[in-house]
Image: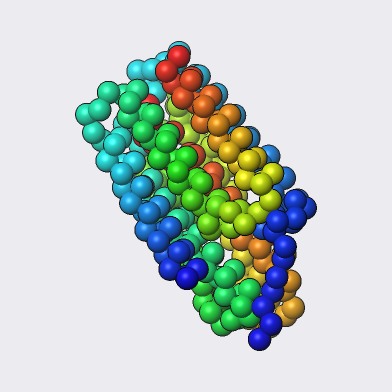
Amino acid sequence: MKINLFLKVWLVLIILTICTALVSNSTLVTSIAATIIVVLSVIKFLLVANYFMEMKKSHSFWKLSILFYLSIVMGTLLFALKW
Amino acid sequence: MESHQINYKNIAYPPGGILMWIIIFLELFTFGAALIAMVLYSKDEPEIFHQSKLLLNTTFGAINTIFLLTSGFYMAKSVENFKHNKTVKATLFLKLTMVGGVLFLLLKSVEYYFKIQAGLTIGYNTFFSFYWMLTLFHVIHVVVGLVVLMFIYVDLKRKSDINLEDFEASAAFWHMCDLIWLLLFPIIYLMF
């Protein structure tokens, strides 16, 4: 059921947001915490794009474009953070 | 009742329309480039960036994330109901979507008020220059998104003919505000 799917996605998004806040307040090494925060953001981004924006149903060109964007921007961000 | 249908597998018809997705990618690349620049600038002044980050209210940022994600959820539900010609439900969910957006703006205004009171304005240091430019630019998008949703809402209330492409394009613009915030919040509020 689609209705339940949206609700499940929303719940996962809220849980991931709480996890992000917890990781940022944890005593983890900064570079590890930063990597986890970026990975959680990527997951949330993909959930919103694929389910709320329904890009999961779109042509693979659009799905690959989103993955391309995330790998370029988040990859560069992680590289810049650790550099 | 006949429901609306678009063949999304066609490369020219992503949900929201090809022009909206060109805009979305342009916006995402602009914010992405600015965030990369912010991280690169932080390398020159790591201590200033760290101390400045501590002056931000992470709780406000997290609550605002929840407001936008919840608003996005209602937007998705509104589109879903509109596709099945359930106009009353679509209108209700659209109203809830806008409430989420207004709550986001209210909390952001409170946050801005405290920052200005503390003298943490755009010229305070490099971190706050990025903070103001990026978050204000995002706020402008949220305001524009709310205006677009308001037009759709009025049309729904008047029972005017709204085609699915227009409804989905408006929804895609609103979700874009979520996507941008999902990049801004962790980098600006949590990273440094």
Residue at image coords 54%, 64%: B76
Split into 4 quadrants, where in the image is the N terminus of chain B? bottom right
Image point (23%, 33%), residue name: A26
Query: Is B138 in front, or is A21?
Result: A21
Q: Is residue B43 visible?
A: yes
- Of residue A83 and residue B192, the one placed in the foreground of this image is A83
Q: Quadrant of residue A27?
A: top left
The quadrant holding residue A24 is: top left
Q: Position of residue B10 (x, y in %)?
A: 75, 55
Q: How is the image coloured?
A: rainbow
Rendered view: B88 above or below A51: below
Question: Does residue B16 appear to the left or right of A29 in the view shown?
Answer: right
Viewer-proximal residue, B119 or B56? Answer: B56
Looking at the image, is A3 positioned above or below residue B141? Answer: below
Q: Is residue A28 left or right of residue B134?
A: left
Left or right of B35 on screen, residue B23: right
Quarter that holds the C terminus of chain B: top left
Left or right side of B5 for A82: left
Residue at 67% in and 58% down? B15
Q: From what the image shows, is residue B31 above or below residue B113? A: above
Percent of width and height locating residue B168:
66, 63
